[in-house]
Image (cartoon, rainbow, N blue to C red):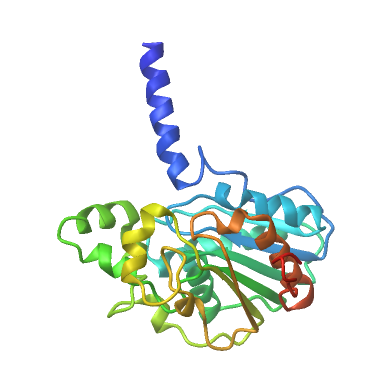
Amino acid sequence: MKLAYLCSGIVGCLALFMLGGCGPLPMCGSANEGAEECVVLLHGLARSNRAMAPLAKALEAEGFRVANLDYPSTRKTIAEIAQEDYPRALTCFAHSPPCARINFVTHSMGGIVLRRALSESRPANLGRVVMISPPNQGSEVADLLNNSWWLGWFYRWYNGPAGQELGVGPGSVPLSLGPVDYPVGVLTGDRHHGFDNWFAGMIPGADDGKVAVERAKVAGMSDFLVLSHHHTSIMKQEEVIEQVICFLKSGRFCPQGQDGKL
């Protein structure tokens, strides 16, 4: 019996690992409770807030007060997430000294959730936004999988309603959103895993295995940077985290040397 429970636990953890970890982390961090600069983190599709944990730790080390939101990305539409789950992150800052600014850092679909939320209502003290590998103009991969006769059922089951809204055709939520009129830095990658070769072949131009470099852009953005990383783990890379901090502090990404370092 114990072995059965152990095996069940291992299988469950392996499944959750694919989504970002074995259960979510606490949303409201306890570090820097008096800090005036606050940051909300929003993870991507089929992940958990564990995927954003390295960013949260680095931002807290820089003195930011951090809320690392976990939300059911595969069980709701993008609009439902924006209306029902996104506001929960703001409650992390409700019982401490007020934030001078509330900044945001997103990965993948998290950027679309944020754009949807801010299109309806935004904090009066909205600060800067960094979007990492966002499908701001949709992704061909979403349409490819959703419309596949042999993979479509699995894609729809695994990624839920929101996963069906990220394409480039009719029903695309990213394409229904207008330009941004707040400070946004977009950072994306131009490498892909070997198992993304098939996807990459369907995406025009350079891509990160899920999103074309050109489709990461959004009208009105303040800065744009391409780094040599793939979609799945770009938000955990040291140079990406450094660039996130640069933009949050200065409103621009930091210049890079010939060796690619800051």
Name the residue rendered at 38%, 76% in the picture.
173
Q: Residue furthest front?
A: 258
Query: Is residue 171 shown left or right of residue 137?
Result: left
Q: Residue furthest right?
A: 34
Q: Nearer the viewer, residue 259 or 252?
A: 259
Name the residue rendered at 82%, 61% in the picture.
97
Residue 225 place in picture, x, y as percent: 62, 75
Residue 249 place in picture, x, y as percent: 79, 71
Q: Quadrant of residue 246?
A: bottom right
Query: Is residue 5 shown left or right of residue 239?
Result: left
Name the residue rendered at 37%, 52% in the picture.
195
Q: Quadrant of residue 160?
A: bottom left
Name the residue rendered at 31%, 51% in the picture.
158
The image shows residue 182, relative to residue 110, as above or below, that is: below
Give the total of numbered labels.
Answer: 0
Query: Is residue 32 shown left or right of residue 217?
Result: right
Residue 107 place in picture, x, y as percent: 54, 63
Q: Nearer the viewer, residue 41 or 260?
A: 260
Q: Nearer the viewer, residue 182 or 154?
A: 154
Q: Nearer the viewer, residue 261 or 88?
A: 261
Residue 70 in sight: yes
Q: Quadrant of residue 25?
A: top right
Query: Is residue 236 shown left or right of residue 23?
Result: right
Residue 75 in sight: no
